[in-house]
Image: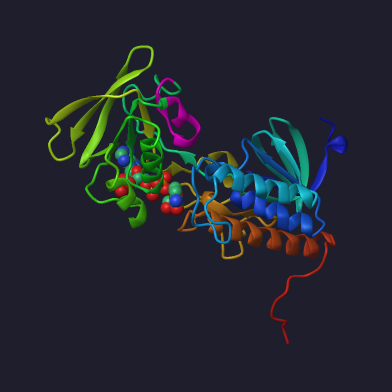
């Protein structure tokens, strides 16, 4: 596309999860022309069946909560496009070209908030049966397993959440974890343990996923003695073993920690002025909706400050805060 005709935005936000959508609410309320580009709406939070630790709203479905974030962002003028960002090119100070599957966009500032991607087990059969019994989203695919037998792999909040949710749909749930201690919240551990149709298979790992057209069984081995093998007949396997950062495409625009997450300072700045990052894709310790939202707000305010200082772009006003003497 002729660059002169490339649409311009003050801020392009990459990712439409809790961090990205909150950033959009903040930038658009500052009268910054804002575009969110995302593969999905709501990110990981939208895939969570029940959220009960987001303050002020009580028990809520993750998809509903994230749609409220999106509606708020749109209400203040942010635009949303469904697509994937492929490359960001720095042309000059406050001048970026964002290349996406839905066209190119010029931006004076960019906020990276595209979260993490589910981690694979890396065992035989996993790739082959993805979408044919292997899933990483209990909320999306769980309803397909009414009255059936499923396995959930993992020991964090996602696995516990998935096991509890699936126990209400499936006839039986095997929860397979490689240790005998869970990483998730105690309240979820207790809930899982109280379910008659959840069988804990601890100190165990999945060696293989077997099937024909679809998954038929999994082979599980004892982590301390791999000769102790058990084949369990299942109709589905939910892999809930955490997430990885897919950030390599950003090249040297940002710095990374040892997990490939984007390094930021406390104001969500990256090593490139004008590029900010927020939420799960960054090296912040805690991956929670409320924290991602807060980080998104910070990134937006910092982007606003950057645009005022470098481009003279005037938004709606300054933040409330301590006035320097
Ligand atoms: P996580 O907390 O990183 O837990 C990943 C689990 O998978 C761990 O138990 C880990 O075992 C296991 N695991 C990792 N690699 C494995 C492998 N190759 N084979 C077998 N098991 C493996 O990830 P998460 O559960 O997806 O949660 C991510 C973040 O989202 C957390 O901060 C979590 O609190 C948050 N979250 C919160 C909620 C909620 O508040 N309701 C719900 C979902 C997620 P080890 O324990 O042995 O390392």
**Residue 222 occupies which quadrant of the picture?**
top left
| Count of marks overlaid on the render | 0
| Colour mode of the rendering | rainbow
Q: Is 100 positioned to the left or the right of 283 in the image?
A: right
Q: Is residue 23 above or below residue 61?
A: below
Residue 134 located within the stretch drawn in magenta: yes
Residue 258 in view: no
- Does residue 181 appear to the left or right of 72 in the view shown? left
Residue reaching furthest to the right: 4
The spot of residue 46 in percent (x, y) is 56, 42
Place residue 268 in its image quadrant.
Answer: bottom right
User: Closest to the observer: 65 or 290?
Assistant: 65
Of the 4 image quadrants, the one containing the C terminus is bottom right
Q: In this view, does 293 lie above or below 81?
A: below
**Left or right: 149, with 265 as reference point:** left
The magenta segment is 132-144
Check the image and name the residue furthest to the top: 213
Q: Residue at x 69, y 30 (%)?
A: 101
Residue found 74% across the figure and 56% down from its top: 27
Q: Where residue 106 sits: x, y (%)?
A: 78, 43
Residue appearing at x 14%, y 40% in the figure: 224
Q: Which residue is drawn at 74% across and 62% down?
A: 306
Q: Position of residue 91 (x, y in %)?
A: 75, 46
Query: Where is residue 271 drawn, in percent x and y?
Result: 60, 56
* Quarter-of-image position of residue 87: top right
Camera-nearest residue between 69 and 312? 69
């Amino acid at each position: 596309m002729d660059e002169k005709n490339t649409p311009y935005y003050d801020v392009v936000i990459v990712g439409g999860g809790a961090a990205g959508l909150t950033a959009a609410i903040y930038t658009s309320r500052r009268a910054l022309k804002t575009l969110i580009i995302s593969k999905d709406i709501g990110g990981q939070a939208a895939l969570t069946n029940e959220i009960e630790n987001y303050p002020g709203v009580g028990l809520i479905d993750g998809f509903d909560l994230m749609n409220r974030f999106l509606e708020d962002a749109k209400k203040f003028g942010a635009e949303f496009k469904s697509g994937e960002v492929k490359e960001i090119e720095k042309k000059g100070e406050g001048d970026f070209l964002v290349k996406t599957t839905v066209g190119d966009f010029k931006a004076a500032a960019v906020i990276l908030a595209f979260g993490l991607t589910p981690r694979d087990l890396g065992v035989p059969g996993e790739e082959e049966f993805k979408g044919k019994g292997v899933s990483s989203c209990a909320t999306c695919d769980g309803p397909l397993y009414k009255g059936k037998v499923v396995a959930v792999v993992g020991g964090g909040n996602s696995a516990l959440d998935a096991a509890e949710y699936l126990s209400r749909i499936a006839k039986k749930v095997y929860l397979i974890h490689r240790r005998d201690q869970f990483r998730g919240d105690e309240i979820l551990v207790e809930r899982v343990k109280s379910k008659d149709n959840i069988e804990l298979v601890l100190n165990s790992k999945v060696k293989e996923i077997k099937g024909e057209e679809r998954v038929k069984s999994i082979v599980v081995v004892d982590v301390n003695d791999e000769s102790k093998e058990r084949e369990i007949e299942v109709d589905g396997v939910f892999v809930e073993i955490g997430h990885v950062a897919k950030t390599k495409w950003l090249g040297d625009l940002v710095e990374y920690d040892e997990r490939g997450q984007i390094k930021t300072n406390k104001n969500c700045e990256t090593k490139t002025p004008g590029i900010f990052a927020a939420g799960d894709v960054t090296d912040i310790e805690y991956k929670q909706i409320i924290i991602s939202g807060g980080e998104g707000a910070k990134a937006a305010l910092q982007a606003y400050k950057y645009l005022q200082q470098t481009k003279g772009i005037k938004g709606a006003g300054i933040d409330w805060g301590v006035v320097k003497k």
